[in-house]
Amino acid sequence: MSAHNTELNISGGRITLEKLSRYLMYISIGIAAGLLSGLFGIGGGTIIVPALVLWAGMSQRLAAGTSVTAILPTAIVGSLTYNLSGNVDWVAAGCLAVGIVVGAQLGSVLLARLSSSVLQWGFIAFLMVTIISLWFVVPQREQALQLTWITAMLLVVTGVCAGVLSGVMGLGGGIIVVPALIFFFGSNDLSAKGTSLTMMVPGSISATIGNLVRRNLDVRAACFVGIGACISAPLGVLTAGLITPLMSNVLFSMYLVIICAQMTVTAWRQRKI
């Protein structure tokens, strides 16, 4: 390769160094998201969306649509890993999934209609509420979710709320579902995380279909982010079982504070442009 040639010949095709570095960046984002997904039972959108906005230069809208698709393989790998240790409540996941499929469609409609500014500040506000709520929810490993007809209906409603968030902000909905399962439904933290990842699968599929129809999705970026996340998600699940529930809350809140600060600075700078 000469000094003036910025292309590599890979398997008979050509790829520029710029594209290669971009693909590696997507995979790196996915690896970080996968670790968080397995560790906290979330889809990883809290790192994927800001990273795509800050590092890949995507709009908030496109980043959200791309993120929710990248979450699909991440959720599959994470849920299967949690299931190996029996930490998935399949009935609860099914109730949540019914709600999230409906909510994700509504969220994808709102995503196409809301301005980037509203999406950014809404995302920031949501992160701040989540940070505060984490200090009111310290789960115990011996807790178990007790299902009744009323509980099942409330789980569906929770799924709808998570689905709207998934479609609008590019999250898997786990940030709502995990604290809700622990605080309102009496689940232990590991079961809440495994159940949350399981219900994300149909929700991600639903939101992806909606975003494809509205052309609000970078399929290639989503694939590379998803590949990276699948690699690291099992390690996150393993780590979740090794740390205490309190330490999990502390680490999660610290991470969200950093993301919230980054997004606030970016949104404020764009406001002044």
Image (cartoon, helix red, strand yellow):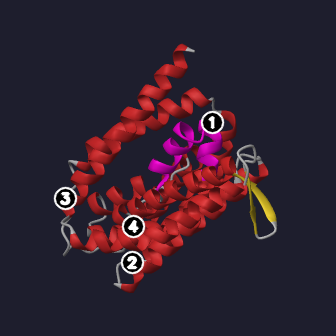
- Of mark 1 and mark 3, the one earlier in the sequence is 1
**In what element is the residue under mark 1?**
loop
Residue with the mark numbered 3: 247
Q: Position of residue 137 (x, y in %)?
A: 22, 54
In the rendered view, does 34 fall on the left or right side of 250?
right
Q: CA distance from mark 4 to mark 1?
A: 27 Å
Specify start and end residues of the magenta stretch as a single range: 44-66
In the rendered view, does 72 fall on the left or right side of 121?
right
Q: Position of residue 195 (x, y in %)?
A: 41, 71
User: Could you tell me which residue is drawn at 75 percent across and 43 percent down?
Assistant: 4
Tell me, yes or no, whether the highlighted magenta stretch contains residue 106. no
- Of mark 4 and mark 1, the one earlier in the sequence is 4
How busy is the neighbourhood of tag 1: few (under 14 within 10 Å), some, or many (20 plus)?
some
**In what element is the residue under mark 2?**
helix
Kindly identify the amino acid type of the residue bearing the numbered disc 2.
Answer: Tyr
Residue with the mark numbered 4: 38
Q: CA distance from mark 4 to mark 2?
A: 8 Å
Image disc number at residue 82? 2
Residue with the mark numbered 1: 59
How busy is the neighbourhood of tag 4: few (under 14 within 10 Å), some, or many (20 plus)?
many
Q: Nearer the viewer, residue 12 or 241?
A: 12
Q: Nearer the viewer, mark 2 or mark 1?
A: 1
Image disc number at residue 168? none
